[in-house]
Image: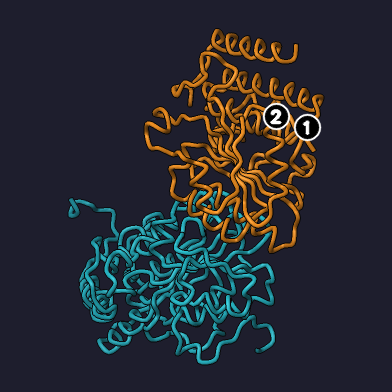
Chain colours: A cyan, B orange
């Protein structure tokens, strides 16, 4: 491992997000002897079991009891330990929302949560296992930091960075079979600081999670059409990088958000809040799940179906490019 | 070692003070969960004035025993005890429930010294207590964790999730109490959803069970010490109590789960408490 690095994963760009975080967490175990890893019978599915194999004494499988797992994490944190909890996003954000809010966030405890199978990444499992509400729910909890890493390398970076970030942190990842956007871990990851993956002047695509991959692919297509798209990886939904958004409004006047989440309440809403509060005119569209329970299918088919893959993004870009952006004071033609 | 007669008298005098404080705060704050605060009082007094290894001057002392009031609505009774123990100036309790006060009806661990967990949503405390007890093991600490639940709270499934986990891990450093006053907001527990046979239920979950009169200091103390000696499993002490204890108009009345007092009712309640304790202590 190179000097100054806290983790190193061979072929990290070929592994799923969960595989990377499982490995990274087990590497962080020596550096942070107070880490206790918790699972609710999903040690294998979430990959937190890798930590358990290395540190069996610091690994607790509570059985299928997520609410108790989050309460237990609160107690362990109050006892001076550093609990890392992993289960599916749907159980974190919905079943155990109250334990996460009241036991962990209300008391501002040092609990790190890695939620897997977020969005529609577990597409074949149906809506009981999809989670397109977690960003909306979790970002409304005071004290909570909310992160949606773009790929495996970024998941490793987010997990490592969360160890030095105060208070509760929610890291949501997919099932992770999508192509990575980062080949190495060394690109300057900082919680709360958006990453410009590609410069552009005509439109800005702001994405998180798997949306970053789709946005980059769309930008390639747009380039061939003569459109210059900026791609921003907004990996931290809260606290959101307001500066990057305002700069995009100023430079491109058109923004599309892309997320594997309901278009209500998640990244798109967080970006919209910043744009509206800025008072600046901006063409804007949100791509994601259009406020419905998603159909069953393979994730890549679903991303296409809900039009937030490259094809869908390009289609929306052509719509928004035709839009006239009002910058005058005359609202007569709007009503 | 069993409590001496003098110790029992001391605890009784303290319970007298605490019950009067609960009535006084309820009067000034406009309304409180007074019934359940009066039923839990004697267990809290036994713990805080005799059994807990704590130091109010060092509320964050990491070797202190932990107490979680899972029935967080009993916060007014808990606050009366914490104030009396010197965790904060008890004169502050006149601001209970007031805008901007650190004291609301469910205590906030970030604002109230001595409060080890913010509770109030029922069914959460036992899991947190289990975490504290497992944390003690992991950190090789000798402190004990105590958790008091309401009996109505036992309807919450999360109590039983945590009960499975605590017994699986043989947490003999964890003692739970059930304030078994028999009433929940809408009426008797056994009419709304049967809880009995409660001891059998905890037994089936792998716990040691002790059943005591929750207003009898000798019995409460005996059970706490017995729980210390039990190895290999957590203990639950089911405390048979009376909701509204010592205040005639409130005793066993579900409607006194929550209520306010005007000055007449306050005086009547204080007189009842005085009569009760003068009868015992002379």
User: How far across and down, in percent of the image, does residue A10 sit?
Assistant: 54, 91
- Residue drawn at x 36%, y 75% as measured from the top left: A211
Q: Is residue B153 above or below residue A3?
A: above
Tell me the quarter of the image containing the N terminus of chain A. Answer: bottom right
Q: Is residue B227 left or right of residue A25?
A: right
Q: Are marks 2 and 1 in contact (CB under 8 Å)?
A: yes
Q: Earlier along the polypeptide chain: callout 2 or callout 1? A: 1
Q: Is residue B257 above or below residue B153?
A: above
Name the foreground residue: B63 vs A332. B63
Q: Quadrant of residue A307?
A: bottom left
Secondary structure beneath dot 1 equals: loop
Q: Is residue B121 above or below residue B80?
A: below
Name the foreground residue: A153 vs A57. A57
Q: Which residue is mark 2?
A: B217
CA separation in Å, label 2 and label 1: 8 Å
- Residue drawn at x 58%, y 44% as measured from the top left: B118
User: How far across and down, in percent of the image, does residue B90 sit?
Assistant: 71, 27
- Residue drawn at x 50%, y 79% as measured from the top left: A154
Q: Is residue A100 visible?
A: no
Q: Quadrant of residue A72?
A: bottom right
């Amino acid at each position: 491992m190179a000097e100054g690095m806290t983790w190193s994963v061979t072929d990290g760009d070929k592994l799923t997000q969960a595989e990377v975080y499982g490995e990274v967490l087990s590497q962080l175990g020596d550096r942070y002897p107070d880490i206790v890893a918790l699972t609710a019978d999903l040690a294998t599915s979430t990959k937190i079991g890798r930590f358990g194999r290395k540190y069996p004494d610091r690994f607790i499988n509570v059985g299928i009891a997520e609410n108790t797992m989050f309460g237990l994490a609160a107690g362990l944190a109050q006892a001076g330990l550093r609990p890392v909890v992993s289960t599916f996003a749907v159980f974190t954000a919905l079943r155990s929302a109250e334990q996460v809010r009241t036991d962990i966030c209300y008391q501002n405890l040092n609990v790190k949560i890695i939620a897997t199978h977020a969005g529609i990444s577990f597409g074949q499992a149906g809506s009981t296992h999809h989670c397109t509400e977690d960003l909306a729910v979790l970002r409304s909890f005071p004290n909570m930091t909310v992160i949606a890493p773009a790929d495996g390398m970024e998941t490793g970076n987010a997990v490592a960075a969360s160890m030095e970030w105060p208070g509760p942190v929610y890291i949501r990842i997919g099932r992770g079979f999508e192509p990575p956007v980062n080949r190495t871990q060394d690109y300057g990851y900082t919680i709360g600081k958006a990453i410009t993956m590609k410069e552009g002047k005509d439109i800005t695509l702001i994405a998180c999670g798997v949306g970053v991959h789709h946005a980059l692919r769309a930008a390639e297509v747009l380039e061939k059409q003569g459109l210059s798209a900026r791609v921003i990886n907004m990996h931290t939904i809260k606290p959101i990088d307001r500066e990057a958004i305002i700069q995009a409004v100023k430079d491109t006047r058109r923004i599309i958000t892309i997320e594997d989440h309901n278009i209500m309440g998640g990244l798109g809403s967080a970006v919209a809040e910043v744009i509206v509060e800025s008072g600046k005119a901006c063409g804007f569209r949100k791509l994601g799940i259009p406020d419905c329970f998603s159909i069953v299918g393979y994730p890549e088919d679903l991303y296409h179906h809900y039009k937030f893959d490259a094809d869908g993004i390009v289609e929306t870009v052509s719509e928004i490019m035709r839009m006239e952006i009002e910058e005058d004071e005359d609202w007569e033609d709007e009503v | 070692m069993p409590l001496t007669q003098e110790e029992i008298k001391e605890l009784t005098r303290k319970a007298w003070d605490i019950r009067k404080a609960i009535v006084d705060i309820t009067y000034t704050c406009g309304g409180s969960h007074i019934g359940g605060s009066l039923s839990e009082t004697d267990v809290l007094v036994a713990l805080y004035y005799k059994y807990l290894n704590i130091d109010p001057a060092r509320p964050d002392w990491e070797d202190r025993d932990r107490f979680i009031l899972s029935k967080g609505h009993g916060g007014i009774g808990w606050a009366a005890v914490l104030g009396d123990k010197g965790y904060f100036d008890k004169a502050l309790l006149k601001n209970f429930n007031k805008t901007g006060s650190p004291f609301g009806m469910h205590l906030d661990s970030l604002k109230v010294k001595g409060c080890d967990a913010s509770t109030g949503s029922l069914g959460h405390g036992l899991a947190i207590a289990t975490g504290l007890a497992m944390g003690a093991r992991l950190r090789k600490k000798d402190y004990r964790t105590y958790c008091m639940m309401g009996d109505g709270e036992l309807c919450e499934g999360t109590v039983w999730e945590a009960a499975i986990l605590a017994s699986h891990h043989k947490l003999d450093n964890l003692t739970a109490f059930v304030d078994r006053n028999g009433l929940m907001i809408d009426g008797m527990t056994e009419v709304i959803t049967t809880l009995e046979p409660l001891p059998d239920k905890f037994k089936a979950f792998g716990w040691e069970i002790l059943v005591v009169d929750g207003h009898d200091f000798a019995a409460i103390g005996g059970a706490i010490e017995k729980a210390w000696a039990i190895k290999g499993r957590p203990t639950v002490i089911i405390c048979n109590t009376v909701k509204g204890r010592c205040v005639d108009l409130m005793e066993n009345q579900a409607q006194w789960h929550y209520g306010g007092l005007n000055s007449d009712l306050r005086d009547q309640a204080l007189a009842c408490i005085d009569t009760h304790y003068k009868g015992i202590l002379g």
